[in-house]
Amino acid sequence: MENSELQLPTVFALEQNYPNPFNPRTQIRYSIPAESFVRLDVFNVDGQKAAILVDQKQHSGLYSVEFHGENLASGIYLYRLDAGDKHQVKRMLLLK
């Protein structure tokens, strides 16, 4: 296979944010194997929505989104990825 060939993901995956813990920015990476409507939200531990990071149709591929927590309190946050009928949640820690 040539290096110029694009390799599309074959599985739905939400990776752990990096860095974690973070202050005040972190990267969230995910992959979707088929075109679908994608939603990536951040919630506090009480279930209140803190941010909407992605809310659109996306092609199959690997994605990276930067999350900015400057206006949030220190603590544990959950981020949830929804793509088609697939869902996954991970935790991250904001330390100020």
Image (cartoon, rainbow, N blue to C red):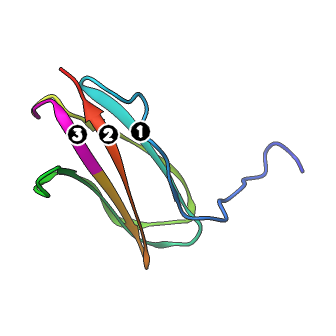
Amino acid at circle 3: Ile
Instruction: Give the side of residue 52 with respect to residue 64, left or right.
Output: left
Stretch of the chain drawn in magenta: 72-78
Q: Is residue 73 magenta?
A: yes
- Above or below: residue 40 compared with residue 72: below
Q: Where does label 3 land, which residue? A: 76
* Identity of the residue furthest to the bottom in this view: 85
Q: Are marks 2 and 3 in contact (CB under 8 Å)?
A: yes
Q: Nearer the viewer, mark 1 or mark 3?
A: 3
- Above or below: residue 49 compared with residue 26: below
Instruction: Give the side of residue 88 with respect to residue 33, left or right.
Output: left
**Residue at image point 15% right, 29% down:** 74
Q: Are marks 1 and 3 in contact (CB under 8 Å)?
A: no
Instruction: Give the side of residue 59 with respect to residue 3, left or right.
Output: left
Q: Where does label 2 land, which residue? A: 92
Mark toward the start of the polypeptide (1 vs 3): 1
Amino acid at circle 2: Met
Mark toward the start of the polypeptide (2 vs 3): 3
In the rendered image, residue 76, in percent from the top left (x then y), is placed at: 22, 39
